[in-house]
Image (cartoon, coloured by chain):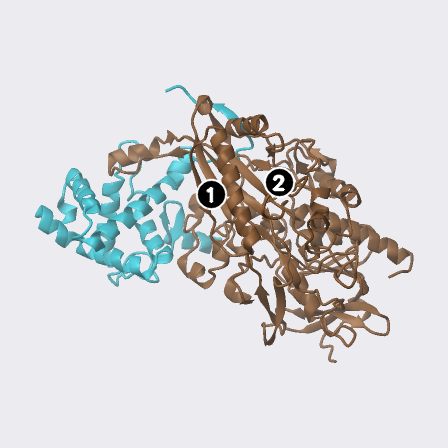
Amino acid sequence: MPQLNTDSIKERTFDAIVIGSGISGGWSAKELTEKGLKTLLLERGREVKHIKDYPTTNMLPYEFEHRNEVPLAIKEKSPIVSKCYAFREDTMHFFVKDDEHPYIQEKPFDWIRGYQVGGKSLLWARHTQRWSDFDFEGPARDGFAVDWPVRYRDIAPWYSYVEKFAGIAGNKDGLKELPDGEFLPAFQLNAVENYFKEQVALKYKTRHLISARLAHLSQPQAVHLEQGRGQCQNRTLCQRGCPFGGYFSSNASTIPWAQKTGNLTLRPFSVVHSIIYDEKKGKATGVKVIDTNTKEEIEYFAKIIFVNASAINTNLILLNSKSNRFPNGLGNDSGVLGKYVAFHHYGGNVSARYEGPLDKFRTDGRSPGSGYIPRFRNVYKQETDFLRGYAAGFSAGRGFYSDTSALGEILKDNLLNRKLGSWRVGSHMMGETIPKEQNCIKLDADKKDDWGVPLLKISVDFDDNDVKMLNDYFEQVSEMFTAAGFKDVKTSKRPGAPGLDIHEMGGVRMGHDPKTSMLNEWNQLHACKNVFVTDGACMTSTSTQNPSLTYMAFSARAAHFAVEEMKKGNL
Amino acid sequence: MKRRSAIKNLMIFAGGIYLLPSCTGNGKASIELKNLDILVGEEALLGEVAEAMIPKTADAPGARDLNLHLFTLKMVDDCHNTKDQKAFKAGLSSLNKISLEKNNKPFNQLDATTRIHFIEAVLKDDTSNPALRTFFEITKKRVIQGFTNSKYVMTDMKQYEMVPGRYNGYFPVEKV
């Protein structure tokens, strides 16, 4: 086959290749380079350097041509990403536009993507709650998917490991269902959030409201200063990229750290076509890359490969890595590759109003934090007519408003003299969904993208369990709000297909048995031991917690394991 | 750098953002528009409407000082659908004619109070002049948005802080 580039094979050979520079790929690259491995970090999108490439980060609201509204022409060209809450004039350069990277929706699926160095770690919601054994034991207890090959005790030290470096603000709340971690001081809840916390504690033995654990430097430690990051300044403009490095991203943290070792080669504009499998050696030997600018095809070689391309694209790469040994995709002896995809159910909101003695308070400044209600349904035993449950976000706020009914000097006077509004409270649902065989990702047989990679066909949908869970969320949270004395309690369904949660998971699941899973307990392909998958694709089930922290822990753990295995000569 | 500042001088500052001027002398609006076809006279008339909604006062700039009529044009041009754009243009074009019918004077010859009463009456009126009503609705919404998001209100009047660096969830409400 033609090698059009002039580099010698030696120059294209590394100890390790990491595919994808988002939240998990950044961690894989950091750990492998720190252990001395010459590592090639491939990113399909463009370079985004910390601070330098955050063009809107210091812009004032009136400096945006459309006051942060996305122009209609862009919305019409990209209706899917336009549904995303974070897609605004100040952030739209960090999102993939629908028309640039098409995919086939066999069922509606809102796939939100960030193709650039740092991936979606620039854009994430930064909530970092640990899983517990109530989550890892879920599939085995409730009889769905397959048993996780790991338990909390396996992952706990790695949670600690990544938390210390990333910087997580939180309280030690002592909850079995949401284990404590290595925390910087928590962000304080406000008057009405604390009031609701007390009300919940008073009226429900097994329900709790805590300050959400967040990847923000509330009080930077030496290891954070060493990364060049500083204290969070409460701007809450995070998705633009933070000039202080106040929140964790690959760009602010793991990638520059990996670069400092001298062992990292970062190659943007490099879409991975497939992983190369050598039948004689019985392992993967490298990857086939298409340079997105020149469309040149280049092969890179390494002893180990970490696939961190984001859940769905990791599935795509493995499905497209076909060989005589693996005609259905790399490591896919079981036939489960691309199947049992799941997501988080963000389909509901409950809102209300508070009035009472706390009206003597308002908020001043801004907080990246909010309240978090860990899952309370079906935790210790099955107690509803649906499986699993949901966590709920909770926040209270009090804004200013102006009467805009008049015109002329009265209107102007009203706009310049705003009135304090009443306290508003709101909650959103974060539900666990059940991975099912029919919720799957496939390659289209004919259609290809601009780089010769087959288009993806996504077929993922809600089910009855999700509907029942949503109704229960509405009932329970409405009841909790009413019990707390909130007024005008209203429920609303959030429009949008699966995917808009931006927590798609699975397709390359972990499990004990190679016949029913793709990866072992070390995120290692059962059938191709030098390939590791540590992004959302590896997830056997979804639980309710925001998943990024768990991807970070899996990445660090698998990287250390891989290095040990290399030393032993097993890889 | 000289070239850059020269270009900047040519640009029109509208409530905080720079808008590209169009070729002058063709009888069209002073800023470049992709979808709307607005005449010089219509732009001036829109300025009168915007100023009626948020007038200059002794201590604070008005809509025209902040070029909020140009901001309105920009937003209608880029962020509204064709239906809105057509109604906006038709409403603006019909303004003087309808004002003559109702007030015996074109809009720009009305005094400030009559202007407000006229706009308010149209905004309440559901049926007889739908395009003019839509035009006033859009203009009011965008002029308010442009004003509250202007440098004057956000920075000079301190309604917005870029870097709070603090949070107090128990901030006492000032006694009135």
Closest to the observer, B82 or A4 = B82
Residue A14 is left or right of residue A341, and the answer is right
| Amino acid residing under circle 2 | Arg
Of the chain colours in the picture, the one used for chain B is cyan
Residue B94 is left or right of residue A399, and the answer is left
Image location of residue A407, percent across then percent down: 24, 39
Q: Residue at x 80, y 54 (%)?
A: A522
**What subunit carries mark 1?**
A
Residue A566 is left or right of residue A443, and the answer is right
Residue A186 higher or lower than A297, as above or below:
above
Rate crowding at label 1 as few (under 14), some (14 to 19) or many (20 or more) other CA atoms within 10 Å.
some
Q: Residue at x 49, y 29 (%)?
A: A483
Q: Quarter-wise, where is residue A126 in the image?
A: top right
The chain whose colour is brown is A
The reply to whether residue A10 is in sight is yes
Q: Which residue is mark 2?
A: A375
Q: Quarter-wise, where is residue A135 in the image?
A: top right
Looking at marks 2 and 1 on the same chain, the residue that comes earlier in the sequence is marked by 1
